[in-house]
Amino acid sequence: MGRFAGKTIVVTGSGKHKGLGQGILQRFADEGATCIVSDRVIDDEAYEVAAELRARGATVHCIACDVSDAAQCGALVDQAVAATGRLDIFVNNAGIGFMMKPLLDVDPADWATVIAVNLSGAFYGTQAAARAMIAGGRGGRIINIASQAAKTGFPHLPAYVSSKHGMIGLTRATAVELGAHGITVNAVCPNHVTTGLGAQQNDYFSKLLGFATVEDYLANMAAKNPMGRPGLPSDTAAACAWLASDDAFYVTGEALNVSGGEEMH
């Protein structure tokens, strides 16, 4: 039996192949957790993600949720508890934001959309999860997937960078309130990971920075990293597994860099 046997984990934005959400659920499935795959739409790709988790031996449920809608976040948690009897770990992973434009060209609607998903969605998810965890009386773990962009600035990403900085503030504020209930709240801050969203960023910034190819851009990125490579979903998943474990019970309100030494504050 794995260390998360008998526990339920919900990961928002986890219905895409090679995404951070899938990588996180794979790690927890391997360690015995009951897994909730959630995305804005539960489509064939999400069902394939679920099937792969079941092949690892996990019990898996799929629940649709648009995290920008508070009512849907509440329904996600309610359905997860109804299906599994409990909620132990909730990961706010859903995110958008590679609407890459210079500051003066950013459309207010794009700004609002990014904030609604990345920051308001994390708030709605945290609130719903905390209510269920308090009612369950067993404590819990809330983990926010932030970004290196939560620690530093990047050009042409004002909404994304702002939303991820805000997620750190949300992490710290909620950790203070929820500690008395045995609930820890932490953030994980990966550096660049080539997921579906990351691939869009690669293409944009390789051109912006004058690289001949995306491959040249990625090679330059790897050369500047002390560990010699960009991040992988499994790196973020490992950090989440530690934060969700009993070993990290006294760790809360933290923003943990998972960047191969690229980000050190």
Image (cartoon, rainbow, N blue to C red):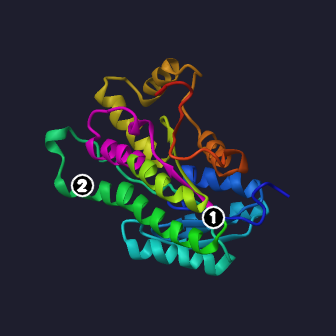
* Residue nearest the observer in this picture, 73 or 249: 249
The amino acid type of the residue labelled 1 equals Glu
Residue 130: give x, y in percent of width and height.
52, 66
* Label 1 SS: helix
Q: Position of residue 35 (x, y in %)?
A: 66, 65
Q: Label 2 belongs to which residue? A: 110
Residue interval drawn in magenta: 139-168
In the rendered view, would you say 82 is above or below 139?
below
Q: Is residue 120 above or below residue 157?
A: below
Give above or below for 216 relative to 110.
above
Q: SS at mark 2?
A: helix
Name the residue carrying label 1.
48
The residue at 75%/58% (across/down) is 4
Residue count near mark 1 (Cα–Cα under 10 Å), binned few <14, some 14–19, many ≥20: some
- Residue 96 left/right relative to 256: left
Q: Is residue 164 inside the magenta stretch?
A: yes
**Disc 2 residue type?**
Asp
Q: Residue at x 17, y 52 (%)?
A: 107
Labels 1 and 2 touching (C-beta < 8 A) = no
Q: Position of residue 172 (x, y in %)?
A: 44, 48
Question: Residue 167, position in %: x, y?
Answer: 40, 49
User: In the rendered structure, does residue 112 fall within the stretch colored magenta?
Assistant: no
